[in-house]
Image (cartoon, helix red, strand yellow):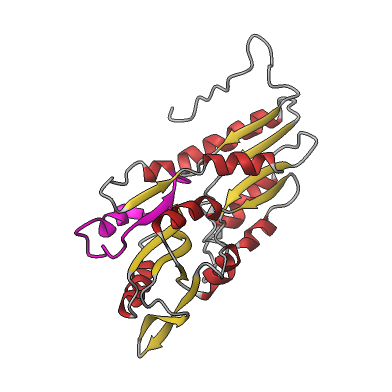
Amino acid sequence: DGTDRIVVGGFTPVNRIAGEHVLLLASFHNNDVTFSQFQVMVVLLQSFIESLTIVLPFYPTGTMERVVVEGEVATAHTYAQLFSSLPSCGRPTRLVVYDLHTLQNRFYLHGNTVASLHTTVPSLIPYLEAAGVDAVAFPDDGAAKRFKHMFDASKYEIIVCGKLRDGDARVVTVQDGDPSEKNVVIVDDLVQTGGTLYECGAALQRLGAARVSAFVAHAVFPREAWRRFCRGGDRAIFDTFYVTNSIPTMTSKLPGDGVFEIIDITDRVIEDLHSF
């Protein structure tokens, strides 16, 4: 009839997960799998487990935390309502999320689920050292406030870009820092069409950057927007485009043409789980 038939292992011949600390690796890459996973969470929490930890590296509704017209749905809030309404196993469910787009999303959660917020930036640092990167740029002031403290200012020139109004247009310019002759990486939490990243990269090149690369924790790339950054694409401006595998259904599609470098965050997740 088109509805899910879901079978969770560990229940035969007896309930083997009762009293256990359960880890669920989740991926909300489309609505169908999202609600299937919510159903599994309910079953687990009602199976006498000791605790549940949900690792959801990319929280996809993080950009929809507010509305601009009445009737528009703030899906960050509705997802948080679903998480908050999960059954209790006697202690809060831990929701592990990486580089959440807006940190205030955590305050939508209440009751039985608590956000455990982390960053993928430590996984990036070895790649920057190997590539000889000596400057870190941010596409806007929000990204700078979010990530700047994670980079050693004695090792990296810190550059902040921003949009200025030029008539009816908004132009990306460098507002702080000097990219001249620097090997620069632009850092942000996620990419969709990549327009702002591209404009930021172009601004850095105009001011004499020797090399420009980019890093995002979450490669969303709707409608195959990644193609424009490949060799020969109209936005092929980056020497290297670093992305994590927080959305494996997307990163599995990225070509190995020398532009995209996929950073595996498995070790990062394990370390963060152990340090809780």
Does residue 265 appear anywhere in the picture? yes
Look at the image and tell me in which quarter the N terminus lies: top left
Residue at 54%, 71% (x, y): give it: 144
Residue that sits furthest to the top in the current view = 13
Q: Quadrant of the C terminus?
A: top right
Residue 221 lies, with reference to residue 197, above or below; the image says: above
Counting from the top left corner in percent of width and height, residue 21 is at 71, 29
- Residue drawn at x 46%, y 39% as measured from the top left: 32
Magenta stretch: residue 223 in it? Answer: yes
Total numbered circles:
0
Q: Nearer the viewer, residue 257 or 152?
A: 152
Q: Position of residue 16 (x, y in %)?
A: 68, 17
Please name whichever residue, 27 or 234, is drawn nearer the observer in this view of the structure.
Answer: 234
Asked if residue 44 lies left or right of residue 131, the reply is right
Question: Is residue 220 among the parts visible in the rendering?
Answer: no
Q: Is residue 140 magenta?
A: no
Residue range highlighted in magenta: 219-247
Q: Residue at x 60, y 34 (%)?
A: 24
- Name the residue furthest right: 90
In the displayed structure, 239 sits above or below 252; it is below
Q: Is residue 76 left or right of residue 162?
A: right
Point out residue 27 in the picture as x, y percentages from the top left corner.
50, 41
The residue at the point 45 percent across, 71 percent down is 139
Location of residue 88 with respect to 130 vertically, above or below: above
- Horizontal arrangement in the rendering, residue 243 relative to residue 231 (left or right): right
